[in-house]
Image (cartoon, grey):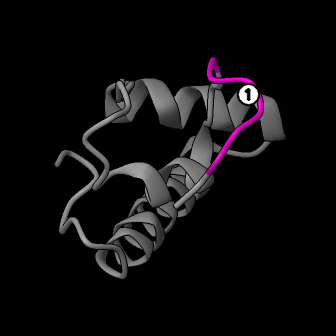
Amino acid sequence: MWRFKNKNVIVEGRSAFMLLDRKDVIKIFLNAPFEFRVKYVSERRGIFIEETRDDVIRSDKGKETLVRGFPCKSPLD
């Protein structure tokens, strides 16, 4: 069990997946539409939209695979 000195903690990103099965935490899931994420990543990295789409799809699949290793089965649980 995780213990924090300060009870008011925000855990974000992939580290937060470890807390998905806990009932004593508030979970907030933010997800932007696919095309918005593609445009944002393309602009941030300075690469073409077509190349970015493949990267975002690959990243989404990788995150889904990561989450399957935890007690929940989906990041939406």
Q: Is residue 15 magenta?
A: no
- What's the amino acid at mark 1? Glu
Image position of 4 with respect to 53: above or below: above
Q: Is residue 12 left or right of residue 58?
A: right
Residue 31, x across and y down, in percent: 36, 29
**Which quadrant of the structure image shows residue 43?**
top right
Q: Which residue is found at the position 18% from the left and 68% from the top?
A: 73
* Residue 65 in the figure: left or right of residue 55: left
The residue located at (74%, 24%) in the rendering is: 6
- How many residues crowd around disc 1 within 10 Å: few (fewer than 14), some, or many (20 or more)? few
Magenta span: predominant SS is loop
Toward which corner of the image does residue 65 lie, by quadrant? bottom left
Q: Is residue 35 left or right of residue 7?
A: left
Q: Which residue is mark 1?
A: 43
Residue 17, percent from left and from top: 45, 55
Residue 74 percent coordinates (x, y) = 21, 60
Residue 4 magenta: yes
Residue 26 in picture, x, y percent from top left? 35, 24
Front-lying residue, 36 or 28: 28
Q: Which residues are magenta?
A: 3-8
